[in-house]
């Protein structure tokens, strides 16, 4: 469940940031994947295709995406957050190009803190998986 939550917590930016550079009508960087509708649809799909179909998987999937939206303060942009209730997404004029935007993002301390935390959690998860019986080497059978 942890890898799913980690991926879902950043999937909004992984989808919307590239769209912002490819589409003039979605150039705010917070569009389709920053909507509550997207969070509900993805959470239901994750739950539907998960092996356990546990209600906690549904809650975790929605919570991962919603927490990203919460920390992005999406309630300041209700047109996007509760899309399609208020119409199409707002467009924002881009004052700089891709590299200036990239350097501003990479120089932000919160980006480094979040990146380090994600790496720590993933390393911890992977290191704990070595003890699982399925990860042990298969013994050769002698005939």
Image: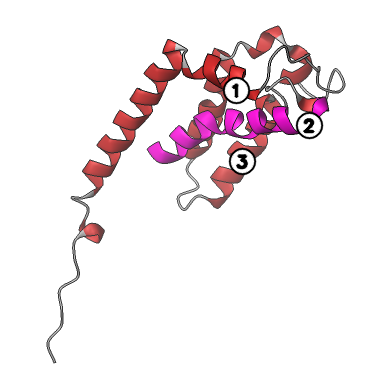
Bounds of the magenta segment: 1-25
Residue that appears at 78% across and 31% down: 23
Q: Is residue 84 left or right of residue 49?
A: right
Q: Give the number of the mark in front: 3 or 2.
A: 2
Is label 1 in a helix, a strand or a loop? helix
Q: Total number of numbered labels?
A: 3
According to the picture, the residue beneath numbered tag 1 turns out to be: 99
According to the picture, the residue beneath numbered tag 2 turns out to be: 23
Q: Quadrant location of residue 122? A: top left
Residue 117 magenta-highlighted: no
Q: Residue furthest bottom?
A: 143
x then y, percent, for residue 107:
46, 14
Q: Is residue 75 left or right of residue 117?
A: right
Residue that appears at 44% across and 33% down: 6
- Whichever of callouts 3 and 1 sits on the residue coming sooner in the sequence is 3
Is label 2 in a helix, a strand or a loop? loop
Q: Principal SS element in the magenta part? A: helix
Residue that appears at 81% across and 21% down: 89
According to the picture, the residue beneath numbered tag 3 turns out to be: 44
x then y, percent, for residue 92:
77, 14
Q: Is residue 136 above or below residue 59?
A: below
- Does residue 117 appear in the picture of this structure? yes
Name the one closer to the observer, 15 or 104. Answer: 104
Spatial separation of the CA atoms under disc 3 and disc 2:
27 Å
Q: Give the number of the mark in front: 1 or 2.
A: 1
- Whichever of callouts 3 and 2 sits on the residue coming sooner in the sequence is 2
């Amino acid at each position: 469940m942890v890898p799913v939550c980690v991926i879902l917590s950043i999937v909004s930016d992984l989808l919307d940031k590239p769209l912002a550079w490819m589409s003039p009508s979605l150039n705010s960087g917070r569009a389709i994947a920053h909507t509550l509708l997207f969070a509900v649809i993805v959470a239901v799909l994750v739950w539907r295709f998960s092996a356990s179909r546990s209600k906690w998987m549904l809650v975790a999937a929605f919570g991962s995406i919603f927490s990203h939206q919460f920390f992005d303060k999406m309630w300041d942009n209700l047109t996007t957050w509760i899309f399609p209730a208020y119409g199409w997404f707002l467009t924002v004029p881009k004052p700089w190009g891709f590299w200036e935007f990239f350097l501003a993002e990479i120089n932000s301390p919160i980006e480094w803190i979040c990146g380090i935390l994600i790496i720590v959690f993933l390393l911890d998860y992977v290191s704990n998986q070595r003890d699982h019986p399925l990860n042990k080497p298969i013994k050769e059978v002698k005939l």
